[in-house]
Amino acid sequence: MLLEAKAAPVCVQCMASVQASGLGVCCSLCSEPMGYETPFQTAECVCSRCEEVRPAFVRATAYGLYEAMGPVLRLFKFEGVRALETPLGELLAEAMVAQAEGMPEQLLVVPVPLFGRRHRMYNQSELLARGAVRAVKRMRPEWDMELSSRCMKRIHHREAHYRLSPEERRENVRGAFCVQGDVRGRHIVLVDDVYTTGATVAECSEVLLAAGAESVRVVTLARAGTLMPALWTPRTRTRHEDRTSVETLRESTLRH
């Protein structure tokens, strides 16, 4: 069970479940879960959405699947459990370091901003970024990471995304962000809690690149699969059904 006290972290069993939530086979550009076995993955496995429109960012990666991480994220995001900043930030740092190949050593870490904090006590993406930067500095001390929580600003918020289609989400965030710092020539790591359709991080990436950023990489704690088909599990047959099936087969054989 998750502990729902506002000052307590989750229990050991739940944290172990979160730590075990890997992405599996995923798109090499946006980390969309592909829903098949690891041996079938290729180095340039790309989802249909990225094949149709290549994203503005270099790569988006995440620590694990939202299906496994959702309960913990809801505590952190909506229930004010700030104590999760450190353990979840460390998981986000692991996702960053896992994509170290080709990563520039001088990085500007930018959390996705909220609009007036949206009635929340804090911006969960900012806390995640802060926890991740602390952890990465221990794991990769050669990286020069600077956290900039005020580099971007959200200037409007129309409606919640959970009611909207991917196309509606994209339109919903159009023009929602602006850059209020100097990002010219900087390599950006854009941090958010969840990547679903990518509408928010795509808009932020385009705004940052338009402001002169050299590149943008996206790192989120969780990735929600939107293209992966539901896995089918055959229904367990009853003993009576097995016996009936055998009798039907025997009768059919005798007739022929």
Image (spheres, helix red, strand yellow):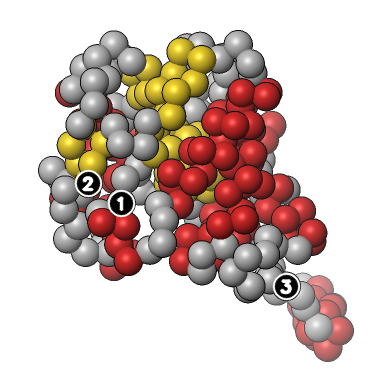
The residue furthest left is 175
What percent of the width, then of the height, locates residue 60?
44, 32
Q: Nearer the viewer, residue 46 or 7?
A: 7
| Distance of label 3 from label 1 (alpha carbons) | 30 Å
Say which amino acid is labelled 1.
Leu
| Distance of label 3 from label 2 (alpha carbons) | 35 Å
- Marks 3/2 in contact by CB < 8 Å: the verdict is no
| Res. 40 in view | no
Q: Is residue 66 left or right of residue 14?
A: left
Say which amino acid is labelled 3.
Met
| Res. 181 in view | yes
Q: Residues within 10 Å of mark 2 (few under 14, many from 20)?
A: some
Q: Quadrant of residue 13?
A: bottom right
Q: Which residue is mark 1?
A: 114
- Marks 1/2 in contact by CB < 8 Å: the verdict is yes
Q: Residue at x 26, y 36 (%)?
A: 152
Q: Residues within 10 Å of mark 3 (few under 14, many from 20)?
A: few
* Vertical position of residue 150 compared to residue 87: above or below: above
Q: Quick one: SS at disc 3?
A: loop
Disc on the earlier residue, 3 or 2: 3
Which corner quadrant holds the C terminus? bottom right
Say which amino acid is labelled 2.
Arg
Q: Quadrant of residue 175?
A: top left
Q: Residue at x 63, y 45 (%)?
A: 86
Q: Which residue is mark 2?
A: 154
Q: Nearer the viewer, mark 3 or mark 2?
A: 2
What percent of the width, then of the height, locates residue 95?
59, 33
Q: Quadrant of residue 59?
A: top left
Q: Residues within 10 Å of mark 1 (few under 14, many from 20)?
A: many
Q: Which residue is mark 3?
A: 1
